[in-house]
Amino acid sequence: MALVPYIENSLPALSKLHNSSAQFRFANRDLHLVQDWRRLGVAAVVWDAAVVLCLYLEMGKVELKGKEVIELGAGTGLVGIVAALLGAKVTITDREPALDFLSANVQSNLPPDSHQAVQVSELTWGQGLDRYPAGGFEVVLGADIVYLEDTFVPLLQTLDHLCSDSSVVLLACKIRYKRDTDFLSMLEQRFVLEEVYYDKQRDIYVYKSWKMQPKKDL
C-alpha cells in the first residue's frame, strides 16, 4: 500500500472514514476496527472494497480453511482477520509505518486460539521479496490496493513472486479512473483475470486471477 497523508474532507460520504472505529460482523464474530485517518491516511480506515471482499470470502467461493493466505496492503487488517476466522493461515502485510496499528487490530479481533495462525509482516511491494517464499501462498488478497500508478509495476512483481501456478488472487476494487483499468490490462499480460462478483450498492468489483500457463509446443 501507499501511505497518503490525511486531508480534511467534509463530504458526508466520507464522514465514516473520520470515525475512530468501525464495527462489523463477519464469520459469526463482532469485529471492532480502530481507524486513524489523521495519522496514517488511507492505510488506517476501512474502505468499502475490504467489506465487499469479506462478504465474498464468507460466500465460500474460495476455500480458505487450512490454506496459506497473504493479504497485501492490509491497512486496518479487516480482510486478513476475516480470512483467519474462516480457517486460513494468514500473513497480513503492509508498510512499516502501519504495522503497530495493524497488529493492534489483529490482536484485539482474533480469539486467542487464532493468534498462532496469523503473522503481521512488513512488505513494501517489489522490495525484499526474498523474505517471502516464491510461490508460497495459495491465496493472495488485496482490497482497494490499485490506485497509484507508481505502485503498479512493483505490485505486479510482488504478485508474480508470491503466486505459484495454482495460486488464486482476489482483488476487490472500485473502478474510478482509466488507470485502474490500465492496471487490470497489465495484470492480464501474466495472469488470467475474471470478474466474479459485483456489489452494486457500493460499486465494488471482485476479480479472481491466476497465473497463465505457458503454451505448450505442438
Image (tube, rainbow, N blue to C red):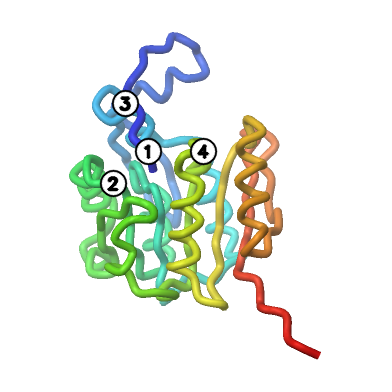
Dot 1: element: loop
For the residues bearing labels 1 and 2, Cβ distance under 8 angstroms: yes
Q: Quadrant of residue 113?
A: bottom left
Q: Which callout, 4 or 3, points to the residue nearer the camera?
A: 4
- Residue extending furthest toward the top: 10
Q: Label 1 amino acid?
A: Ala
Q: Label 4 amino acid?
A: Glu
The residue at the point 25 percent across, 57 percent down is 120
Q: Which residue is mark 3?
A: 37
- Residue 149's disc is 4
For the residues bearing labels 3 and 2, Cβ distance under 8 angstroms: no
* Marks 4/1: CA–CA distance: 11 Å
- Asked if residue 50 shows in the view, the reply is no
Q: Quadrant of residue 202?
A: top right
Q: Which residue is mark 2?
A: 95
Q: Which residue is mark 1?
A: 2
